[in-house]
Amino acid sequence: MSDTITLPAPADFHVHVRQGAMCELVTPHVAAGGVRTAYVMPNLVPPLTKTEAVLEYKKELERIAPNVEWLMTLYLHPEVTPDEIRKAAKAGVSGVKSYPRGVTTNSSSGIEDYGVYYPVFEAMEEEGMVLNLHGEVPSDDEKNISVLNAEKHFLEHLRKLAADFPNLRIVLEHATTAEAVECVASLGPNVACSITAHHLWLTIDTVAPQPHHFCKPLAKEPRDRKALQGAVRSGNPKFFMGSDSAPHPSASKMPSISEAGELHSCAAGCYTSPYLIPLVATLLESFGALDKLQGFVSDNGRAFYKIPAKAGEEVVIRRPAVAVKVPSKLEGHGNEVVPFWAGRELGWEIVN
Ligand code: NCD
Ligand code: ZN
């Protein structure tokens, strides 16, 4: 493989760019990481449940980073009616993200029953909008459901939705299990799957002792990571990059003690935006899939979403002459974020 690779307009099909001061800090990092098109998550406070709010947010992102194509989503919620879907589609909103209630950051307004949203899914199918699924069911002691098996239990919902809406494009977001990879591969062409950079590297052994590796869904066993790497190596176009880059202030990643002496839990999310394409190239090369890099970061997701790469938006990467390390923190606008892979060396760097 050569020492320089030209990628047609890389696209990140799952990214969190937050709001307020954090948004000012992290939004420019998307382009810096080599991404030209970004599919933005709606789990703000309050969540984006109205077309107007989505458009206002998009304007803000365009102000901060006009060099990125921002693709927007609504947060699935009772306020998202079939009429709202038609309005959103007309306004150019690309998809709707479903968060099961309580499973991750800002998901307390999430859903409990997919059945009640069937009229919404029908409208989305008609309008050509994409349904993005956070694929975990809430924990339930009686049913022995926990963060360890929440994704496997979700797959029955995915199979049912895929069967009931064969013309609705559905993405299982940030898959973490061998079972999810098998399930997506077995379903029809309307179902695809995003894979993060961090899940191609982490397993539960490296998550357990390190809050900066804590994200939802949790990284699972070595066999699961192997299946995710295998999905990328296979070149199957159903699998593409969605970084789930999810910045949190560094203090909220550390367990802290309240004034009353209680321990707070740490926030879920890994932050990869600022060096995403070099990181993904480094990881793919480590498991023999560098020849699938273009498919994974540029072609596959764009084909599924029907968002062709624009000429002139290529990103060139090369092997660095001098070692490049991921910084131990990124600071600005009164915020500090510790990135994933802090202090580790990257095998690739962006040229342009
Ligand atoms: C995300 C966040 O912080 O917004 N966290 C995460 O662990 N992935 C939410 C999400 O995508 O689940
Ligand atoms: Zn996410």
Image: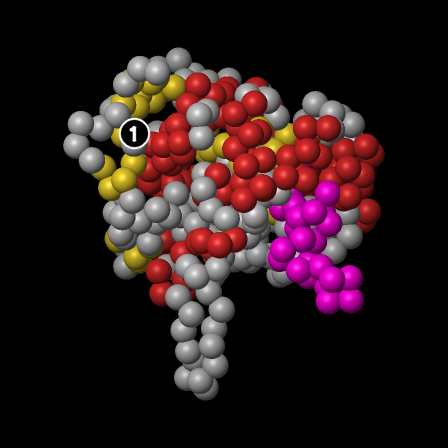
Which residue is depicted at the point 67% across and 53% down?
Answer: 149
Residue of label 1:
348
Q: Residue at x 73, y 28 (%)?
A: 186
Query: Which percent across, then down, holds residue 213?
Result: 44, 54
> Which residue in the rendered view is the most extreme toward the bottom?
260
Residue 157 among those drawn in magenta: no
What residue occupies the far left of the structure in this picture? 322
Residue found 74% across the figure and 56% down from its top = 112
Relative image position of residue 28 (x, y in whole percent): 32, 40
Residue span colored magenta:
130-155
Q: Nearer the viewer, residue 196 or 36?
A: 196
Local secondary structure at mark 1: loop
Mark 1: amino acid:
Trp
Q: Can you see residue 164? A: yes
Residue 109 visible in this rendered orientation of the protein = no
Quarter the C terminus occupies: top left
Is 138 within the magenta? Answer: yes
Q: Is residue 207 placed above or below 297 in the rendered structure?
A: below
